[in-house]
Amino acid sequence: MLRTIITILLMSISTLLFAGDQPDRPKIGLALGGGGAKGAAEVGVLKVLEEKGIHVDYIAGTSIGAIVGGLYACGYSASELEELFRTQEWLTLIGDRNKDLRNSVLDQRDGVTYLFGFPISGAGKRARERGDDIIDPTAIGAFSGRHITHLLDSLTKRYDGIKSFDRLPIPFRAVAVDLKEQEEIIMDSCELELAMRASMAIPGAFKPVKWKGRTLVDGGMLNNLPVDVVRQMGADIVIAVDLEQSDHEERDFSLKETFGIGGILDWLVSRPDWKKNKANREDADIYINPQLDDYDVSSFGAESIDTMIERGERAARKCLESQSNNIKWE
């Protein structure tokens, strides 16, 4: 017995000494951009990273990138996320559709008026009655996002009550924007589904999320490719997956600075996200930009999803192979 204990102690000491002589490997960060349905390509990138044994240490995501990144940070594998993309009725989820009324032109249930199952009036009152307290039912937005919020809640249930996203299997950040203050908000500690839902709240399309007195909308308004965020988390090497398909000319003109007019109108004129996107693209160590210009944010059809996943894989392999001599993973 004593000999066994001594042997185990010697092996432990040897392991510690050997490990102490080895340099720490670089920390890998993953920045996932926004782009609606085009987020399927990010799943393709994750598949390739897993195939090549590249371990991700930090993740930051915006909009659909926050959903893909948040679920991956929870421990979902690339194959599980692929299955999620292929099997969910995304347009029904996003549009809060009542599938029982999909064949009815106009119908009314519980004070809500539906057109082919999609709520067109009265949904705000119903949201309040159902207790969906993270959504601001009085704010402007075509969809409440209630169904997708519930889906995200069910997928992340095991991490209810965590105090920090640093305690997830992979530390994670979601990027949102305070609509009133036009301020970027880095979400690192709250209900995980709240952070993902806030990050995807496209103004006008989805109702904003209420959080700590703020009104939060899609992070893509200010930072659609959060390379800087994942770099601040401690990443030495940043892999960025950009779903945008064109370079934008930066604008210096601002209504807010010139005439004191802020809000959405000033954002449309000044487009501060374009300047941030350019800086983040240049700061990424590995920049992956899948060819998706024939798709848009609503391309959730089965064939489109399959193609975008495959294009994500193809772009990831090409970029990683071309950078294999320049990046030291170990």
Image: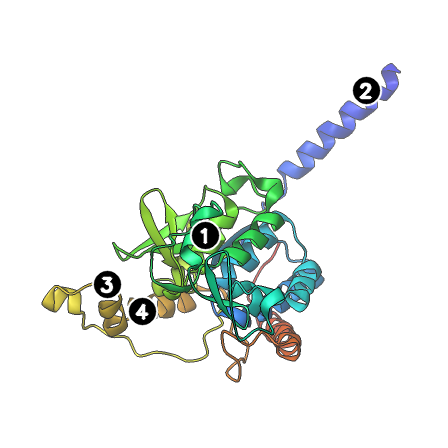
Q: How many marks?
A: 4
* Label 3 residue SS: helix
Q: Is residue 65 visible?
A: yes
Residue type at mark 1 is Ala
Q: Select label 1 or label 2 by which is in front.
A: 1
Helix, strand or loop status at disc 2: helix
Seen at 24% across and 71% down, the residue is: 270
* Number of the front mark, 4 or 3: 3
What is the CA distance from the residue labelled 1 to the residue labelled 4? 37 Å
Determine which residue is flagged by label 1: 127
> Which residue in the protein does label 4 denote?
275
Q: Quadrant of residue 167?
A: top right
Indicate which disc, 1 or 2, sits on the residue closer to the N terminus.
2
Q: Amino acid at mark 2?
A: Ile
- Residue displayed at 70% across by 63% down: 83
Residue position marked by numbered label 3 in the rendering: 263
Q: Earlier in the sequence, mark 4 or mark 3?
A: 3
The quadrant the C terminus occupies is: bottom right
Circle 2 residue? 6
First in sequence: mark 1 vs mark 4: 1
Is residue 224 depicted above or below 2 in this figure?
Answer: below
Which one is closest to the eye, mark 3 or mark 1?
1
Of the two numbered discs 4 and 2 in the rendering, the one whose residue sits closer to the viewer:
4
Residues at marks 4 and 3, CA–CA distance in whole angstroms: 18 Å
Considering the image in quadrants, where does the N terminus appear?
Answer: top right
